[in-house]
Image (cartoon, grey):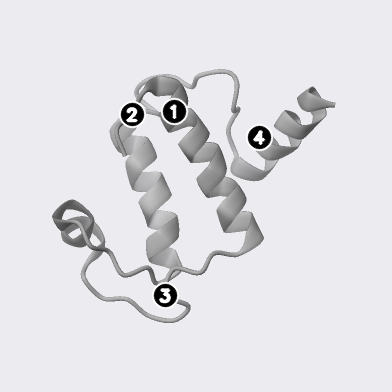
Amino acid sequence: MKRTVFAALAAISGFMLLAPAPASAQSCGDLWYRRNAIYAEAGYCFQTARARSVFGPGCFPPYGRLTPNQQARINAIQAQEDYRGCPR
């Protein structure tokens, strides 16, 4: 059962949750960017200087409200960040 759930999440997110990807493709910086790009796509109002410098200060509707697919991608990326010990 768990294996099926992880496989489904991996298919949704576009990468494997349990097997680490190559460091060049999945560094902490890459994961941070991918996660925050999803929030930027959803109009999130960024507060940190780093995020504002990369994604801009503007925010727009739906103001960071994520679709179920976006939330699944965020969850998968955060799982990779946790696995790698990345700061958030």
What residue type is disc 3 on?
Tyr
The residue that appears at 43% across and 19% down in the rendered structure is 22
Q: Is residue 49 above or below residue 58?
A: above
What residue type is disc 4 on?
Ala
The CA span between labels 4 and 1 is 16 Å
Sequence order check, earlier mark of 3 and 1:
3
The CA span between labels 2 and 3 is 25 Å
Provide the residue designation for mark 1.
Answer: 82
The CA span between labels 3 and 1 is 25 Å
Residue 69 x %, y %:
63, 56
Provide the residue designation for mark 3.
Answer: 63
Choose top left, top right, bottom left or bottom right for residue 13.
Answer: top right
The CA span between labels 3 and 4 is 26 Å
Q: Does residue 64 appear to the left or right of 76 in the view shown?
A: left
- The C terminus: image quadrant: top left
Tag 4's secondary structure? helix
How many labels, in total? 4
Q: Is residue 40 above or below residue 74?
A: below
Residue 86 — which label? 2
Provide the residue designation for mark 4.
Answer: 10
The residue that appears at 68% across and 38% down in the rendered structure is 9
Mark 2 and mark 1 in contact (Cβ < 8 Å)? yes
Q: Nearer the viewer, mark 2 or mark 4?
A: 2
Residue 38 — which label? none
Q: Nearer the viewer, residue 27 or 71?
A: 71
